[in-house]
Image: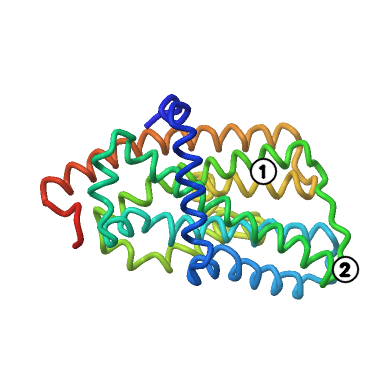
Amino acid sequence: MNVRVLAKYWRTILIVAEMNVRQQITDGFILFTVIFQPIIIALLGLWMLQDKGADAAMFVVVGSGLTGLWSSLLFISGNSINFERWTGTLESLVAIPTPFEVIVFGKNLANVVQSLVSMVLGYFIAAFAFGYSLDIQQPWLFLPSVILAVIAFVSFGLIIAPIFVMNPGVRAWQNAMEFPVYVFCGFLFPIALLPGWTTPVSYLLPPYWAAVALHGTSTGGASLNETLFAWGMMLLFSLIDLLIASRLFKLMLYKARADATLGME
């Protein structure tokens, strides 16, 4: 899949995203993953750092929201294809003219956008429960950073979903994959606090560049050049992820058809 395909089917993507939000709005597991868990992290972080000032509070608010983005990607988007298989709708979705990865892109978009709610709630908790006066220092750069972060996370999710289908054993490692990304991507504290050998690992993870852009523009700690570089890296990783995902989806569907496993396992 490429940018041209996404542009062609943008209406379909938005319709799928809206339908997905309607389906998931009462799901307890999804609500916990994308809203309540990040809020718990925000509360703990704000309480621990309540005497460190507004910048630290903003870092926690943004970081807790990023944990929700990653968790939704890992647990919800990662299992989106398997969910269609379990409910018996996978064969129908594969048979329609719309490319299947476009459908999954729309589902991932819904999951990631829903997760942003936790960031907004964390902001109000910091303001009203802890008395912080929080201002986004570079709002004209923060909003584009949010949009690019959503694109980067959704694109990365397109790789995770087919991998989980073709390698069911990987799903057993979902919990183990959650918290290392929090650490290596600097969601809750700067990676400068980690050993130097971890830095190249962080640079290879798309969520890290989302964290750089969002933390930097919200606290004012990043220069314009640093923000632009983070944007460029998010766009680059998004394009790479879309290309890899296209091949993975073709391989997944070929394997599923050959093994006759499009239906319920």
> Which corner quadrant holds the N terminus?
top left
Query: Viewer-proximal residue, 116 or 178?
Result: 116
Q: Tell me the tag on residue 131.
A: 2
Query: How far from the left and from the top, in percent, is residue 231?
Result: 62, 35
* Residue at the image point whose x is 63% and y is 33% from the top: 229
Select label 1 or label 2 by which is in front.
2
> Which corner quadrant holds the C terminus?
bottom left
Query: How far from the left and from the top, in percent, is residue 234?
Result: 55, 38
In the rendered view, tell whether residue 247 sits above or below residue 212: above
* Residue at the image point whose x is 57% and y is 55% from the top: 114
82 vs 155, left or right, is left
Query: Viewer-proximal residue, 45 or 144?
Result: 144
Residue at numbered disc 1: 213
Query: How far from the left and from the top, in percent, is residue 97?
Result: 29, 33
In the rendered view, tell whether residue 258 sits above or below residue 198: above
Q: How many marks?
A: 2
Amino acid bearing label 1: Ala
* Quadrant in the rendering for residue 3: top left
160 vs 138, left or right, is left
* Residue at the image point whose x is 27% and y is 62% from the top: 86
Q: CA distance from mark 1 to mark 2?
A: 25 Å
* Quadrant in the rendering for residue 8: top left
Query: How far from the left and from the top, in percent, is residue 144?
Result: 67, 37
